[in-house]
Image (cartoon, helix red, strand yellow):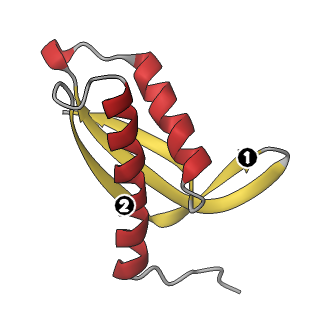
Amino acid sequence: MSNVHEFNREEQQKIAIAVDKVVKEELKKLGLEEKINYEVAVDNVRSVGIQGDNRTYKRCAELKLRFPNNQVDYDLIERLSNQITNQVQEVNRVLCNFF
């Protein structure tokens, strides 16, 4: 038996918009919205993750980030990842890519 879930464009777009909103809000709070370029993508596969005491099967969000002078801010990445997984119910994992 297959456990394949149809993932349509509308669902993908809805999740991407929610993730983008969280990232914008966090960057604005920190005064970094003009300093960090980013892109958001949502993977078409489910990820197994642990949230609280439960195993979850949700989506992966991918953040493509460009930091000033290529100096990666790992505290910011942790903050964004936590906020995304806490605020966007459909996401349980955040992947980061630097460009």
Going by the image, does 81 lie left or right of 28? right
Instruction: Please tell me whether mark 2 sits on a helix, a strand or a loop.
Output: helix
Residue in the picture at 50% in, 37% down: 81
Answer with the quarter of the image where residue 56 lies.
Answer: bottom right
Query: Circle 2 sits on which residue?
Result: 16
**Residue 90 horizontal side relative to residue 54, left or right:** left
Q: Secondary structure at mark 1?
A: strand
Q: Position of residue 74 (x, y in %)?
A: 42, 18
Q: Position of residue 53 (x, y in %)?
A: 85, 46
Q: 10 Å neighbourhood of mark 1: few (<14), some, or many (≥20)?
A: few
In the image, residue 52 sits, relative to residue 32, either above or below, namely: below
Q: Which residue is mark 1?
A: 50
| Amino acid type for the residue under numbered disc 2 | Ala
As displayed, is residue 72 above or below residue 66?
above
Nearest the viewer among 51 and 34 is 34
> Which amino acid is tagged 1?
Ile
Q: Which mark is residue 41?
A: none
- Residue 45 in percent (x, y) is at 49, 66
Residue name at image x 32 percent, y 42 percent:
24
Tell me whether the residue at label 2 lies in contact with that at label 1, contact meaning CB atoms closer than 8 angstroms: no
Residue at 60 percent across and 59 percent down: it is: 89
State the CA–CA distance, disc 2 to disc 1.
21 Å
In the rendered image, the vertical position of residue 37 relative to residue 8, given as above or below: above
